[in-house]
Image: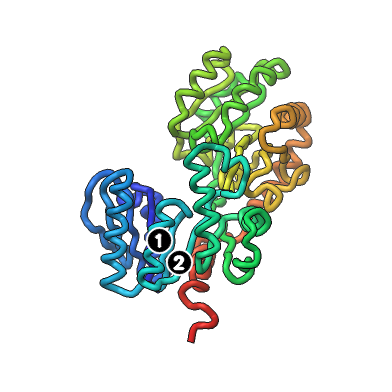
């Protein structure tokens, strides 16, 4: 199978990066993968074992024009089985017009719940992408969503049920999580010593993008939580544009001893082992891989009703789910689990079992499923 893909992750061009490794895996299972990469700096064509990377240097509108020209040149030179786009955004528009111009099937990947009302209200870009999703998804030849929630949202909230059959044209494939690394990890003695003075330790992790992750709500809730548990700790791990906002909020609330804004860590599996509770307060999510990682590490989870909530995390069974933005309910769940150690153990054990049984379990199985999500586009049943 020969696939043309659009990516906006410049790490694809960096040898040894996780993104580069993931694309190399895709190329091996597909046969031939050509990726147009949005990057600010110019670069040379990179080729390795069926993976072809084309840097589309330039930012803004010029970057999209450059990506279009590269895509059109490639489609003129060779026949692709599928054009795959990682989001129904402006890159999705390029993929759509290329698919129509060169008569190549289009696959759209959905990594975010575009139909969530919280997403559409997050900002002007999100509103634009919400509109584009409603336009592009019904016109795609096949769709890969990372959660059943996204499929349900598009069927019930976008009015496209009659134009897009879930069974035949939408494949659900979550982001692969190597849970073995979290099962087998052990707490780091240095981390244990660093946080030894705290009675109850909570952690959250993700991109520092406030309109999506809602980490400010956690910091705000800590003002109340420390009244219940003075020696409580909240660590928020990640990187992103709102990092300074979190630090400033922590300082303004005089919570420097109870809230730590931690840079992203490559040793997250062992780092998680030093905590008592994992928190995910997001306004919207496509999936929520961090939740799976926390469950595999043996942490009970409190999360908002986003992403894999309801599909993987069942409230009061292997975690606690609260409504999006409900500060009081979220805080109550935190306090409840702080006071009830036995319930924490029950939820943690159930969550760990859930993570262990999650499908697909191996990277080989995942890659096979990844190819299967593209096959309805490349090899439609009615093709003669």
Label 1: which secondary element: helix
How many angstroms separate mark 1 from mark 2 (CA)?
A: 7 Å
Q: Position of residue 169 (x, y in %)?
A: 57, 68
Task: Report which quarter residue 234 is drawn in.
Answer: top right
Q: Residue at x 46, y 74 (%)?
A: 378
Q: Going 31% across and 62% down the picture, which residue do you hit?
A: 71
- The reply to whether callout 1 and callout 2 are in contact (CB within 8 Å) is yes
Q: Is residue 162 left or right of residue 10?
A: right
Which of 185 and 38 lies nearest the eye of the viewer? Answer: 38
User: Pointer 2: what residue?
Assistant: 106
Can see residue 170?
A: yes
User: What residue do we see at 57% from left, 38% from top?
Assistant: 121
**Left or right: 181 as drawn, with respect to 312:** left
Left or right placement of residue 110 versus residue 29 in this view: right
The disc placed on residue 295 is none
Q: Position of residue 267 (x, y in %)?
A: 47, 39
Q: Quadrant of the N terminus?
A: bottom left
């Amino acid at each position: 199978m020969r696939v043309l893909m659009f990516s906006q992750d410049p790490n694809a061009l960096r040898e040894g990066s996780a993104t580069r490794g993931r694309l190399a895996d895709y190329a091996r299972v597909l046969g031939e993968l050509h990726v147009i990469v949005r990057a600010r700096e110019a670069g040379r064509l990179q080729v390795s074992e069926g993976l072809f990377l084309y840097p589309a240097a330039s930012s803004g509108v010029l970057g999209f024009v450059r990506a279009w020209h590269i895509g059109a040149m490639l489609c003129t030179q060779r026949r692709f089985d599928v054009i795959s786009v990682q989001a129904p955004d402006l890159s999705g528009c390029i993929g759509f017009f290329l698919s129509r111009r060169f008569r190549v099937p289009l696959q759209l990947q959905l990594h975010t719940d575009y139909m969530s009302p919280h997403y559409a209200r997050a900002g002007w870009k999100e509103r634009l992408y919400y509109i584009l999703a409603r336009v592009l998804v019904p016109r795609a030849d096949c769709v890969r969503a990372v959660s059943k929630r996204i499929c349900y949202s598009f069927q019930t909230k976008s009015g496209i049920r009659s134009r897009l059959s879930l069974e035949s044209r939408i494949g659900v494939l979550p982001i692969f999580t190597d849970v073995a690394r979290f099962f087998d990890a052990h707490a780091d003695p240095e981390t244990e010593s660093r946080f030894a003075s705290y009675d109850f330790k909570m952690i959250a992790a993700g991109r520092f993008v406030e309109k999506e992750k809602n980490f400010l709500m956690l910091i705000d809730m800590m003002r109340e939580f420390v009244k219940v548990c003075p020696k409580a700790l909240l660590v928020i791990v990640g990187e992103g544009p709102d990092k300074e906002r979190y630090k400033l909020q922590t300082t303004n609330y005089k919570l420097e001893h109870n809230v730590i804004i931690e840079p992203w860590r490559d040793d997250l599996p062992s780092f998680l082992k030093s905590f008592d509770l994992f928190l995910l307060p997001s306004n919207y999510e496509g999936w929520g891989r961090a939740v799976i990682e926390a469950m595999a590490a043996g942490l009970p989870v409190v999360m908002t009703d986003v992403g894999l909530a309801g599909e993987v995390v069942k409230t009061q069974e292997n975690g606690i789910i609260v409504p999006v933005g409900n500060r009081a309910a979220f805080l109550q769940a935190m306090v409840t689990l702080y006071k009830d150690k036995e319930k924490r153990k029950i939820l943690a054990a159930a969550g760990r079992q859930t993570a262990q049984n999650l499908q697909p379990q191996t990277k080989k199985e995942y890659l096979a499923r990844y190819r299967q999500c593209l096959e309805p586009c490349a090899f439609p049943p009615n093709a003669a």
